[in-house]
Image (cartoon, grey):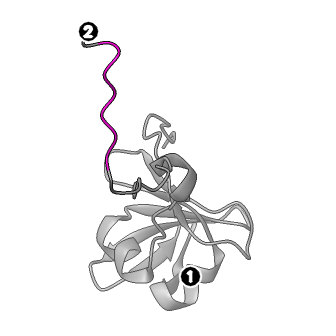
Amino acid sequence: MTRRSIKIESAEPNLQTPRTSKIQNSKKKTKIFKSEDVVRVAWSVKTFDEDRYVKVSMNGLFVQLGNFSSFKTIDELYPEIRNIVDSKGLIVAKRKSRNSGLAYCKDKGIMIPA
C-alpha cells in the first residue's frame, strides 16, 4: 500500500460551521457627532440657511458672521447645522438633510475659504 491509497476517516462528524466573511456581517457604521462633540471640535459651522456661525466661547456659544448681535447656543444651533469646520479650516462633519444625523466626514482634504 502506498500513502496515497490510505484514507483516514475521523469518527467525529465535521462540526465546522461555514465561515462567513466579516464584510457581509458588518454594517457601515458612521460616527455621529453629538452636541458635546460639536462644542469640542468646531471652529465654525454652516447652517442649512447658508448662515455661518463662529465659536465665541468653549461653552458652546456661537455668533453669526455679519450680524454680531445674534448669539446662539449649541442647543439652539445643533438641529440646523449642515457642516462643521475645525481650526485648520477642514470640514470634519456633514449633514445631507435636516432629518439625517451629523456624520463624521472621512475626507478631511476639503478646505473652506475664509
At which x and y percent is residue 31? 45, 64
The residue positioned 62% from the left and 81% from the top of the image is: 79
Q: Secondary structure at mark 1?
A: helix
Q: Is residue 73 visible?
A: no
Q: Is residue 96 above or below residue 7?
A: below
Q: Residue furthest front?
A: 1
Q: Is residue 29 visible?
A: yes
At which x and y percent is residue 26? 51, 58
Disc 1 crowd, CA 10 A, few/some/many (<14, 14-19, 20+):
some
**Highlighted magenta segment, given as a residue range:** 4-10
At which x and y percent is residue 102? 56, 68
Side (left or right) of 112 relative to 60: right
Q: Spatial distance from mark 2 to mark 1, Cα to Cα?
A: 80 Å
Q: Residue furthest top?
A: 2
Q: Is residue 103 above or below residue 101?
A: above
Which quadrant holds the N terminus? top left
Q: Secondary structure at mark 2?
A: loop
Q: How many callouts does the rendering have?
A: 2
Q: Amino acid at mark 1?
A: Leu
The residue positioned 74% from the left and 66% from the top of the image is: 97
Q: Amino acid at mark 2?
A: Thr
6 inside magenta stretch: yes
Q: What residue would you read off at disc 1?
A: 77
The residue positioned 65% from the left and 76% from the top of the image is: 80
65 inside magenta stretch: no
Disc 2 crowd, CA 10 A, few/some/many (<14, 14-19, 20+):
few
Image disc number at residue 2? 2
The residue positioned 33% from the left and 57% from the top of the image is: 12
Circle nearer the N terminus (2, 1): 2
Main SS category, magenta section: loop
Image disc number at residue 41? none
Q: Nearer the viewer, residue 62 or 99?
A: 99
